[in-house]
Image: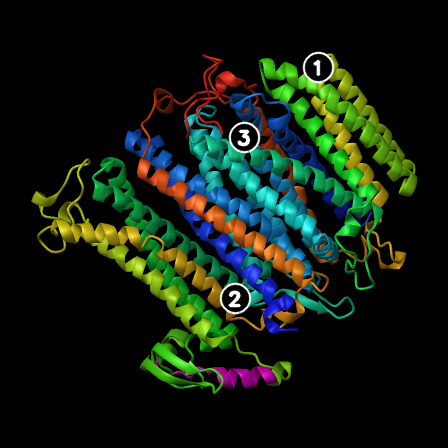
């Protein structure tokens, strides 16, 4: 069959579309849950109204976002069986367990406590209501952890044996699956990238209000929180990316060679800035490189040997038999660069912002501003002019989606860089698809999902924009006087609910 | 009883939990057209399940994940075999979740009306399709020697399975109606009780026909007991509804669902998906299950996590125990 319409190709496209789309919402959900919980904690502790306003504002954006994350996640739970039945049969004994853990521990947590949080403003005492959003946050983290453990097993299978008689992989050590270094590093990298994403989101929206000089007290706090989150998230993303990269050099040298378009092994190996190659010929035509840097990134040593695509392909042929074991090199190469580029651009903007908006002793006394003033952006000793200030706010606004692009390319890189394997060294992707599902069926489902997701994206973005523009809500008496009893105070039985669908 | 038998029971428990809980919230979704006379009443209905529908739906995800882990072959055959019906269910669940969350977020009439229409259809369609799916599982489908489903989507739309679909649809609607009577106050509560009688009678007739058909085709002594319990509970639920005992009525309609699902699984055992082509090609608790080690870990998980889930989900229902009426629904958009 024509490769473009092969069930494997279509099933991969569908998985790619639905998963990348789902993951647009995941990192924002993870970070906004924690940030909202942090803001609400500040409200409970200090009783300053700006924190409650901030909680309500960011909480609303968080809810608009998590709704999409939840519903697109449903597909993920069933898609393995639908489109990858041979994969499911072969790995279910190992791969199913973390998914079941995720559902039974994390999903129940998340979904139950989010209901309590949304509807609980007038039903729960302040501290219990606060505990609910923290539970949601813990749920999001646990969920990400289990699914990353499952993915890490596909990247680097451990704790299993092959049962020849039954023709499948069987779990022998669940603890190893949960704690292998691939899992821990992927979790570290994904979590920090999630906070980078949430930080950039917060900064972008706060910048928008700074520019319009509206809702300043809430947005000043949000800007600060966002910038710190962005900077810390950025540093940790870089650090964890480096350690994850080193792990990958050991576990999947092909992926990393492809990430660098390093065709032939070198010692010392250079880091590629730009390359344009001839994939069929197996070499680069144009290459701009930093000598020795790749050796350092791979092994913390500027002179070490790094194997190339051609050598690795040869080694894999010897181990697994004839075939082509290289991924689509330009996708891996550019995916890797876009991941780093977009992520670090956001991080730099955050660092710059943190410096520009510095406070207290770092800033000359005359330039310090009050709670309800837009902070001066101070590069050295004098504030930036109106145009430059506006430029910074605009940049922050327009780049708030950069981490989303980086996240997407990160996943595309790591998943496509593993090809032709679905489980590295154990099962190839072409052997994983559902033999009984027809091309027509996959085309149907792919079109339906793509269309539905596109429509929902438009709806979601418009809704976000509406609530971003509206800014934080005014607080009511009821908001400031939460109930003292579980189930709500019974003073007025006919009082409207604080929140209703 | 070996571990794979335990897991057969646990999967049954998860589906039972799903149908019991999401059963009434599908029913409430259907009632937005059947019972509500205006927007305020629609909102009363939607808000009776507002804080809980998401948690209810996780029972499905857990059933899916647990089937993957405990019976990979079952997971693979079922979801690749029932591809298009499952796609329809997934699309409905996606739109339904968004509809609940987004409906109130804009004041425009068209926006709200469209999401309300969505709530109705995306509750009705899965309520029907789950019955069709389970009807086919019990009846058996074309499974070949590689444990692959080889029938077409039309094979799934046979009279028995379609009747199963009508049974789940009407039963869930009844369940939702008595739930509404239990959770609302004012005029809508009275009308819910009146409607419950009508829907309940239709559900009773359909369920009786379907369960007797099932019993005749593949039942035994145990499934007969489940059948009798299911039908008796439904009759008593109707009586309780007439007597104004709303709590009892809801509990008993729940018993009907539990007993009906139990009957499904009793007639199924030790198969999990029988083949109509050759009995040797059926998926069973032995040939579809995971290794002993995986099942052991899963059993520990279930033993620790399930009671906790029941505890905190139960607590949610207690927190939101107050009845609601139109007076509790604020005018403004959020």
Residue B31, above or below A90: above
Q: In the picture, which quadrant includes the N terminus of chain A?
A: bottom right
In the image: residue A498, left or right of residue A175: left
Is any atom of residue A308 visible in this view?
Answer: yes
CA neighbours of label 2 inside 10 A, class few (<14), some (14 to 19), many (20+) = many
Q: Is residue A291 magenta?
A: no
Viewer-side residue, A471 vs A43:
A471
Q: Which mark is residue A339?
A: none
Label 3 marks a residue whose chain is B
Query: Which of the marked residues, 3 or 1, is nearer the chain's N terminus?
Result: 3
Secondary structure under the numbered disc 1 in the rendered image: loop
Name the colour scheme: rainbow
- Cα separation, mark 3 vs mark 2, equals 37 Å
Secondary structure under the numbered disc 2 in the rendered image: helix
Label 2 marks a residue whose chain is A
* Marks 2 & 1, CB-CB < 8 Å contact: no
Q: Which mark is residue B50?
A: 3
Q: Which residue is mark 1?
A: B245
Q: Please provide percent x and percent y for residue A74.
A: 58, 48
Secondary structure under the numbered disc 3 in the rendered image: loop
Is any atom of residue B309 visible in this view?
Answer: no
Q: Please provide percent x and percent y for residue A40.
A: 37, 35
The residue drawn where x is 48% and y is 24% is: A123
Q: Which residue is mark 2?
A: A415
Q: Quadrant of residue B121?
A: top right
Label 1 marks a residue whose chain is B
Residue extending furthest front? B110
Range drawn in magenta: A302-317
CA neighbours of label 1 inside 10 A, class few (<14), some (14 to 19), many (20+) = some
- Cα separation, mark 3 vs mark 1, equals 24 Å
């Amino acid at each position: 069959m024509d490769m473009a319409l092969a069930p494997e190709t279509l099933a991969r496209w569908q998985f790619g579309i639905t998963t990348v789309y789902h993951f647009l919402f995941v990192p924002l959900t993870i970070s906004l849950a924690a940030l909202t919980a942090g803001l609400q904690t500040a409200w409970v502790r200090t009783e300053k109204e700006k924190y409650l306003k901030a909680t309500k504002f960011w909480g609303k954006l968080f809810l608009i976002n998590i709704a999409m994350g939840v519903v697109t996640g449903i597909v993920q739970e069933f898609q393995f069986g639908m489109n990858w039945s041979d994969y499911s049969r072969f790995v279910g004994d190992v791969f199913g367990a973390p998914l079941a853990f995720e559902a039974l521990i994390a999903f129940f947590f998340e979904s139950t406590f989010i209901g309590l949080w949304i509807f609980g403003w007038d039903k729960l005492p302040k501290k219990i209501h606060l505990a609910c959003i923290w539970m949601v946050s813990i749920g999001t983290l646990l969920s990400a952890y289990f699914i990353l453990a499952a993915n890490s097993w596909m990247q680097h299978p451990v704790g299993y044996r092959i049962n020849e008689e039954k023709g499948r992989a069987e779990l022998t050590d669940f603890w190893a699956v949960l704690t292998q270094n691939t899992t821990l590093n992927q979790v570290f990298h994904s979590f920090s990238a999630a906070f980078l994403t949430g930080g950039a989101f917060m900064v972008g929206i706060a910048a928008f209000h700074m520019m319009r000089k509206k809702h300043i007290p809430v947005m000043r706090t949000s800007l600060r929180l966002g910038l710190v989150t962005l900077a810390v998230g950025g540093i940790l993303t870089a650090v964890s990316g480096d350690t994850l990269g080193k792990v990958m050099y050991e576990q999947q040298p092909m992926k990393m060679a492809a990430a660098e378009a390093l065709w032939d092994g070198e010692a010392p190996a250079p880091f590629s800035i730009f390359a344009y190659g001839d994939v069929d010929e197996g070499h680069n035509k144009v290459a701009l490189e930093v000598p020795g840097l790749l050796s350092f990134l791979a092994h913390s040593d500027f002179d070490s040997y790094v194997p190339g695509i051609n050598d690795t392909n040869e080694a894999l042929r010897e181990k697994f038999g004839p075939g082509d074991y290289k991924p689509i090199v330009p996708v891996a190469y550019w995916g890797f660069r876009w991941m780093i580029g977009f992520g670090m651009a956001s991080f730099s903007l955050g660092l710059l912002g943190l410096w520009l908006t510095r406070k207290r002793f770092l800033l000359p006394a005359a330039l310090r501003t009050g709670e309800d003033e837009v902070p001066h952006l101070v590069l050295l000793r004098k504030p930036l002019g109106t145009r430059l200030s506006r430029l910074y706010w605009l940049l922050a606004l327009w780049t708030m989606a950069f981490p989303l692009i980086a996240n997407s390319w990160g996943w595309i890189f790591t998943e496509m860089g593993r090809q032709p394997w679905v489980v590295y060294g154990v099962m190839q992707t072409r052997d994983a698809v559902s033999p009984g599902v027809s091309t027509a069926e996959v085309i149907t489902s792919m079109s339906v999902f793509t269309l539905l997701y596109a429509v929902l994206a438009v709806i979601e973005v418009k809704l976000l924009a509406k609530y971003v523009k509206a800014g934080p809500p005014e607080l009511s008496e009821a908001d400031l006087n939460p109930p003292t009893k579980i189930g709500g105070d019974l003073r007025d039985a006919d009082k409207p609910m604080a929140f209703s669908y | 009883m070996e571990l794979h038998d335990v897991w057969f029971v646990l999967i049954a428990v998860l589906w039972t939990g799903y149908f019991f809980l999401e059963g009434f919230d599908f029913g409430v979704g259907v009632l937005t057209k059947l019972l509500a006379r205006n927007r305020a009443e629609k909102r009363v209905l939607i808000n009776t399940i507002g804080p809980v529908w998401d948690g209810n739906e996780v029972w499905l995800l857990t059933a899916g994940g647990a089937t993957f882990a405990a019976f990979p072959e079952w997971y693979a055959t079922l979801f690749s075999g029932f591809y298009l019906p499952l796609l329809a269910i997934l699309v409905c669940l996606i739109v339904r979740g968004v509809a609940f969350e987004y409906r109130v977020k804009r004041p425009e009439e068209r926006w709200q009306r469209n999401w309300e229409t969505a709530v109705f259809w995306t509750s009705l369609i899965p309520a029907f399709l789950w019955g069709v799916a389970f009807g086919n599982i019990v009846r058996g489908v074309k499974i070949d020697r590689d444990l692959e489903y080889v029938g077409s989507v039309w094979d799934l739309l046979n009279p028995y399975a379609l009747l199963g679909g009508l049974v789940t649809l009407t039963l869930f609607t009844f369940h939702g109606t008595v739930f509404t009577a239990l959770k609302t106050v004012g005029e809508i509560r009275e009308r819910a009780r009146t409607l419950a009688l009508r829907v309940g009678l239709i559900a009773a007739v359909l369920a009786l026909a379907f369960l007797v058909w099932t019993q005749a085709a593949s039942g035994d002594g145990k499934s007969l007991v489940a059948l009798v319990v299911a039908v008796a509970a439904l009759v008593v639920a109707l009586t309780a509804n007439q007597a104004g005992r709303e709590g009892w009525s809801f509990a008993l309609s729940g018993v009907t669902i539990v007993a009906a699902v139990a009957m499904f699984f009793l007639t199924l055992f030790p198969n999990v998906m029988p083949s109509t082509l050759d009995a040797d090609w059926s998926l069973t608790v032995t040939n579809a299950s995971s290794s002993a080690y995986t099942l052991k870990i899963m059993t520990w998980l279930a033993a620790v996590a399930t009671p906790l889930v029941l505890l905190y989900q139960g607590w949610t229902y207690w927190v939101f125990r107050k009845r609601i009426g139109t007076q509790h629904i604020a005018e403004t958009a959020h």
